[in-house]
Amino acid sequence: MKRERICQIFSDMPKLETPRLLLRQMRVSDAEDMFDYAAREDVTTYLLWSPHPTQSYTAEYLRYIRGRYSLGEFYDWAVVEKESGRMIGTCGFTRFDFPHNCGEIGYVLSPDYHGRGYGTEAASRVLRFGFEELGLHRIEAKFMKGNEASLHVMEKLGMTFEGYRRDGMLVKSAYRTIGICSILKSEFDSVDSIK
């Protein structure tokens, strides 16, 4: 996998679909929907970022992201519930390890939509894109210890828990233990064929 190829693909962010969700480029017009969950302390407890202070802050962030999209340097989709048309979270790649043909995914979903399988549905579609369209060999996901809900999504995706990195990250002035899960293309093909 080449960096240039990834930049080319993501500079024209592809739309992805599932039965209930549309995954598309984030827009400045999503600011109200994003702010609804991004301002919540309970959403950001296990994330690297702090709650958004204002809706205008969220809009400015989305303007910044628009520029990153145009360069092919941002790999995160808006997760939109088809029925309501609302942006309910994000899901996508947080990084690529080009020499080793590996990617890492991450996801955030509004708590108002938890318990409906949306996180698993969106992440499964992103895994499929990573393996089939990007030709990745391995995809990882990380979670902070204590965030069992995120681990549960990873397990539902067929990922294997590989262990913890004790105090592996300094997040918001505190050392956090980080769990890592992964899935290989061959494993995804097997899990996906069962569904």
Image: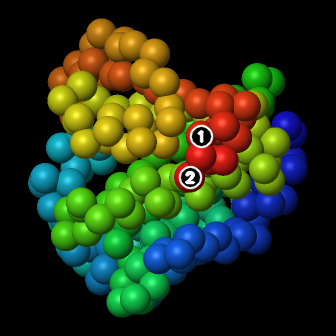
**Residue located at (24% from left, 61% from top):** 114
What amino acid is labelled 2 in the image?
A: Lys
Picture quarter containing residue 125? bottom right
| Marker count (numbered) | 2
Q: Is residue 98 above or below residue 65?
A: above
> Can you see residue 54?
yes
Circles 1 and 2 in contact, beta carbons < 8 Å: yes
Which image quadrant: the N terminus? top right
Q: Is residue 30 visible?
A: no
Percent of width and height locating residue 69: 65, 65
Q: Which residue is mark 2?
A: 195
Q: Residue furthest front?
A: 194
Residue at the image point whose x is 49% and y is 60% from the top? 122
Residue 152, percent from left and from top: 32, 39
Q: Residue furthest top?
A: 166
Where residue 148 sits in the image (x, y, percent)?
23, 35
